């Protein structure tokens, strides 16, 4: 018994879908995000926000956050991030003057040891991992790795996740408000505690979910890595899905310095309520514009504003001192 020739030809053309190899799951990039220049022209700091704009999220969704902020919160945020930009520029200028350019540029490569470590973690199914490598001198992305478990948490095939990241079309995986909180909290945290891992509890979108509740409460842990000159060269992100018991143990740890952040992010809601609210939060309840239409939403935005003023005040004062030192003295 034999198959007809045309059937044999069809079978030979069939391709079985296999898991992506580690090296295929890694992407390299050589083009900067156009959003950086656009947002910079609107007065938002370029370098401080680079790792968020360069990562691969949808430019339209990121812009919605910043252009929709209420006036007072926008003013406070600009002042805070501008201060960080001034401090960072001053630090880089001093580094450039102290070290030959070839030494500074020599650290802008990814070593085989770095990639080998990622390959070891690649098969770990207990948590998701993303590693975002940047050029230390510009903040431009140059390499991105996404683990299989990350794709599973997001509900995406690895090919789709990589394609969306490469074309900068990955939708935000959390609400606009939560993502804005993540940006301002992480910027402050890494400036205050350089080298320490950031740990936040967030509800993220299960993008490929067919269920009614498309949210997954997740512990988001980020660890920055620096080159030998103190410049950020990569950001490693790990995602640990939480059950109800694990979430409550983290929330009840009031000695954690990040507990205030987690409370602002969740709005003080319990595990079940947060998940049940997630779909409506994504579409309206925690969009920046949607929050300004309700009393409760405005109260949360105002609470965040007060917290940002308190957190960033030392950096604003330090940036003012840097600017005063650079001002020309009175002519004598």
Image: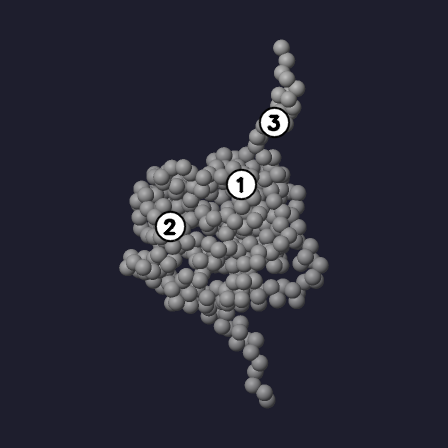
Separation (CA) of disc 3 from disc 1:
21 Å
Look at 62% across and 54% down and name the residue there.
31
Relative to 255, say whether 311 is above or below. Answer: below
Q: Is residue 237 above or below residue 72?
A: above
Using residue 254 as the reference point, say whether residue 100 is left or right of it. right
Q: Report which residue position mark 3 lands on.
A: 14
Q: Quadrant of the N terminus?
A: top right
- The answer to whether residue 18 is seen in the rendering is yes
Give x and y (percent) for residue 222. Answer: 49, 48
The CA distance from mark 2 to mark 1 is: 23 Å
Query: Which percent across, then down, holds residue 266?
Result: 35, 50
Q: Which residue: 38% across, 58% down?
A: 288
122 vs 34: above or below: above
Earlier residue among tags 2 and 3: 3
Residue name at image x 53 percent, y 74 percent = 323
Nearest to viewer (mark 2 / mark 3): 3
Q: Is mark 2 in CB contact (under 8 Å) with mark 1?
A: no
Q: Secondary structure at mark 2?
A: helix
Residue behind mark 2: 283
Is residue 324 or residue 267 the one in the foreground? Answer: 267
Q: Quadrant of the C terminus?
A: bottom right
* Residue 129, disc: none
Q: Which residue is mark 1?
A: 160
The tag earlier along the polypeptide, 3 or 1, is: 3
Residue 20: quarter of image: top right
């Amino acid at each position: 018994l034999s198959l007809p020739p045309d059937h044999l030809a069809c079978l030979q053309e069939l391709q079985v879908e296999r898991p992506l190899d580690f090296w295929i799951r890694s992407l390299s990039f050589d083009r900067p995000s156009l959003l950086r220049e656009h947002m910079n022209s609107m007065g938002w700091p370029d370098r401080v926000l680079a790792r968020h704009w360069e990562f691969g999220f949808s430019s339209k969704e990121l812009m919605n956050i910043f252009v929709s902020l209420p006036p007072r919160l926008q003013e406070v945020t600009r002042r805070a991030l501008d201060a960080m930009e001034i401090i960072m520029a001053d630090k880089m200028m001093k580094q450039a003057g102290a070290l030959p350019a070839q030494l500074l540029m020599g650290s802008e490569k990814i070593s085989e040891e770095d990639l080998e470590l990622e390959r070891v973690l690649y098969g770990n199914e207990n948590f998701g991992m993303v590693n975002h490598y940047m050029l230390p001198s510009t903040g431009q992305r140059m390499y991105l790795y996404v683990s299989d478990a990350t794709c599973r948490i997001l509900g995406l095939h690895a090919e789709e996740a990589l394609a969306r990241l490469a074309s900068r079309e990955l939708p935000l995986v959390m609400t606009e408000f939560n993502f804005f909180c993540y940006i301002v909290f992480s910027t402050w945290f890494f400036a205050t505690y350089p080298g320490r891992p950031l740990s936040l509890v967030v509800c993220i979108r299960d993008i490929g979910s067919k269920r009614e509740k498309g949210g997954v409460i997740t512990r988001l842990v980020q660890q920055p890595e620096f080159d030998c000159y103190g410049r950020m060269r990569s950001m490693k992100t790990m995602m640990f899905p939480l059950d109800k018991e694990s979430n409550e143990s983290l929330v009840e740890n009031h000695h954690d310095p990040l507990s205030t952040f987690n409370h602002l992010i969740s709005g003080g809601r319990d595990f079940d309520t947060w998940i049940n609210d997630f779909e409506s939060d994504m579409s309206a309840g925690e969009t920046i514009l949607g929050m300004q239409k309700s009393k409760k939403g405005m109260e949360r935005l105002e609470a965040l504003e007060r917290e940002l003023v308190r957190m960033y005040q030392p950096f604003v004062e330090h940036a003012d001192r840097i600017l005063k030192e650079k001002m020309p003295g009175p002519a004598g």
